[in-house]
Image (cartoon, helix red, strand yellow):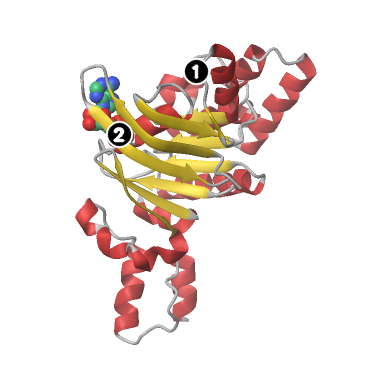
Amino acid sequence: MPPVLEVRDVEFSYPDGTRALQSLSLGFARGRRTALLGRNGAGKSTLFALLNGIERPGRGEVHFDGAPVAYDRGSLRQLRRSVGVVFQDPDTQLFSASIREDISFGPVNLGLPRGEIQQRVEAALAAVGLTALAERPTHALSYGEKKRACIAGVLAMDPRVLILDEPTAGLDPPMAAELMILLNALHERGITVILATHDVDFAFAWADDLCVLQEGTLAFHAAADDFSAVAEHFPGLGLELPWVYEVFGELWRKGAIDGETPPRTRAELLARLR
Ligand code: ADP
C-alpha cells in the first residue's frame, strides 16, 4: 500500500533565499502515528506546509494517496479537507466568537447540509471534551482548552491525516497525557497522525515511527520499536535520549532488569522492575 502522504526528493526555499528543505524523501504510512523530531529550524513546519499544500516545493513532488498533488484550486481544497493541520499557536488558528462557531467554520465553508454540520460539530466537541464549553468565547479559554478547540476545528473537517505542530508545547504533564489519550483515540478511528515535537519522551512513548530532520534533510526514519538501532545518533543530532530508554539501558548494563526490549513508558519501566 502506498504511503498516504509522501514527499519525493523535495526542495524548498523561502523567497528570501533560505533553503528550508533539500533532497527530502519521506513517506507517512496509512494509519501510523509518526513523531517528527529535529532542532529548531530543521524544517518540520515547512514540511507540514508542503504536506497540506500551503507551500509548493521548488523541486520534487508531494503525493497524497499515491498521486502527485495538483495545485489547482479544487485539488488544494480537497487536499486540505483530507490533511488537517493544527498549528503551534492556538491564537493564530481561533478567530470566531465562540468555540462552537469556530468549529463550525470549516464544515459551513464546505457547504454541508445543516444537519451534518451540527452532527460534525457535536462529534468534534465531544472528541476533545469541550461539549460543556461550546458557547464559551474563544478568548476565555485556558491554553490547553484553546489547543483542544483547534484540534476540534480540524476534526470537524473529517480529515484522513491529522498533523500537529508542537502540540505539547505549553501543556503541563497531565494535559500532555490527556492529549496522548485523545490522539490515540483518533488513531483508533483510523486517522493517520503526524506531529512535530521537541518532547522526546512524549515521542518515544506515543509514536509508532520516529523521523528526525536535520538542516532540511532526513537524518533517519525508524520504528520506535527499533529505537535501539538509531539511539546512538541522537546526541549528534542535538537530541536527548528518552529518559525511560536511558534508565533502562543503565539498569540493563547493571543486570538489574530483564529483557532486551526497552520499555516505552514510565509505567512499563516500573512494571518491569517489580
Ligand atoms: P522547524 O519547524 O523545524 O523549527 P522551519 O520549517 O520553521 O523549522 O524552518 C526551516 C528553515 O526555514 C529555518 O532555517 C528557518 O529559519 C527558515 N524559515 C522558516 N520560515 C521562514 C520564512 N517565512 N522566511 C524565511 N525563512 C524561513
Q: Is residue 206 left or right of residue 107?
A: left
Compute the Cα span from label 1 to label 2. Answer: 19 Å
Identify the residue shown where x is 22% and y is 58%.
235
Identify the mark nearer the N-term, 1 or 2. Answer: 2
Q: Quadrant of residue 54?
A: top left
Residue 220: x and y in percent read 34, 53
Residue 32 visible in the displayed image? yes
Identify the residue shown where x is 47% and y is 48%.
34
* Amino acid type shown at disc 1: Tyr
* Neighbours of disc 1 within 10 Å: few (<14), some (14-19), many (20+): some
Identify the residue shown where x is 61% and y is 35%.
160
* Amino acid type shown at disc 2: Leu
- Taking the image in four quarters, ligand 1 sits in the one at top left
Residue 51: x and y in percent read 46, 31
Could you say which disc has been placed on residue 21 in the image? 2
Residue 91: x and y in percent read 42, 22
- Disc 1: which residue: 71
